[in-house]
Amino acid sequence: MLITCPYCGPRDVIEFTYQGDGNRERPDSASQNFEAWNAYVYDRLNPAGDHNEIWQHSGGCRAHLRVVRNTLTHEISSVAFVRGDHQGRGDHGSAARRKAEDKA
Amino acid sequence: MVERQSPEPLSPLEPEFHVGSHGNFEHGVEIILTETRPGSIVQLAAWPGEEKKLIAAIRTVTGLALPDGAGGGLSDGVKSVFGFAPGKFTVADEAEGLAAAFAKVVTPAIGTVTDLSHGRIAIRIAGPKAEWVLAKFFAIDFALPAFPVGAGRSTTHHDIFAQIQRTSADQFDIYVFRSFARSFWKALCHASEEVGYEVQ
């Protein structure tokens, strides 16, 4: 399985580390909503098909990536930086980030 | 910043560094292996949004104008620089003192300077079969159009990090952990045996 890192290009899956389900939403640290914490820790969609995942390119640029992988075929349909602000193959990352910050 | 300078740096390769021709060299030597022993190896990282300032700082200190693009880099034969991750760069210089020079220019608001001069070593592999030998180690595309001169790549060999910069069409500088360098060097020598290699 190849994952195309937005910075490094296509690399073998052995260079990457799975960091878990990308659909989780972490409750606020001060939250005492136990159902929300329970859902964050335990509830998983486990779909047979496209799945949002977080991977780290631990054997390369070490960036965290938001990957959509088909759990039936292993087809990767999208890869993006988790931060969403590094363009990677553009200008070492700065322009895309500024755009994101301007929007925020 | 405390600048550590060794009056006589010792190579971790020394017990396995045998100058001369080795392997199957009867029909010619197709690989040249050397240790470049740069005086300084520094990693720079920009805070989000500060990349352009860091790139300008690299130009101020080294005189090298970093090209745009992921993994972009260049070398003038004395100093080298390349990107290895978003907003992060490795810089090497034959002379010592690079970290101190960067510490003056890269302010805490721009990013960080990490002196790895004593933590990494640089091994140079050159020759017509350099791509071919490296392809045994790393699952990346070493062809010139995919890996242009000056560019850098961050990858691993058996889970051990390696940063590779192409410094000419048939020459690569590989930065590896000092503590793993001898093992990597031995592996590189074994991999080069079948095409004949010379250690210089």
Image (cartoon, coloured by chain):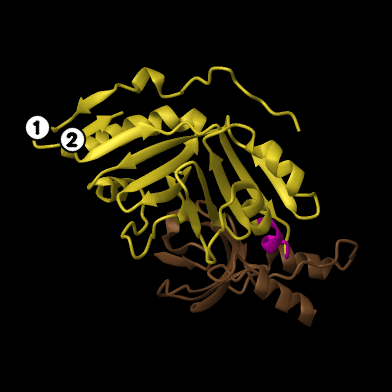
Chain colours: A brown, B yellow
Q: Which residue is mark 1?
A: B26
Q: Quadrant of residue B47?
A: bottom right
Q: Residue at x 18, y 36 (%)?
A: B29
User: How many residues crowd around disc 2 within 10 Å: few (fewer than 14), some, or many (20 or more)?
Assistant: many
The three-letter amino acid code for the residue at tag 1 is Glu
Does the magenta-highlighted stretch encompass residue B3? no
Residue B68 x, y percent position in the rendering? 54, 66
Q: Residue at x 76, y 43 (%)?
A: B104
For this rendering, which residue is in front, B6 or A15? Answer: B6
Is mark 1 in CB contact (under 8 Å) with mark 2? yes
Give me the chain letter of mark 2: B
Q: Quadrant of residue B92?
A: top right
Residue B191 x, y percent position in the rendering? 26, 38
Residue range of the region highlighted in magenta in the rendering? B49-54
Q: Which residue is mark 2?
A: B196
Question: At numbered mark 1, what does the secondary structure look like: helix, strand or loop?
Answer: loop
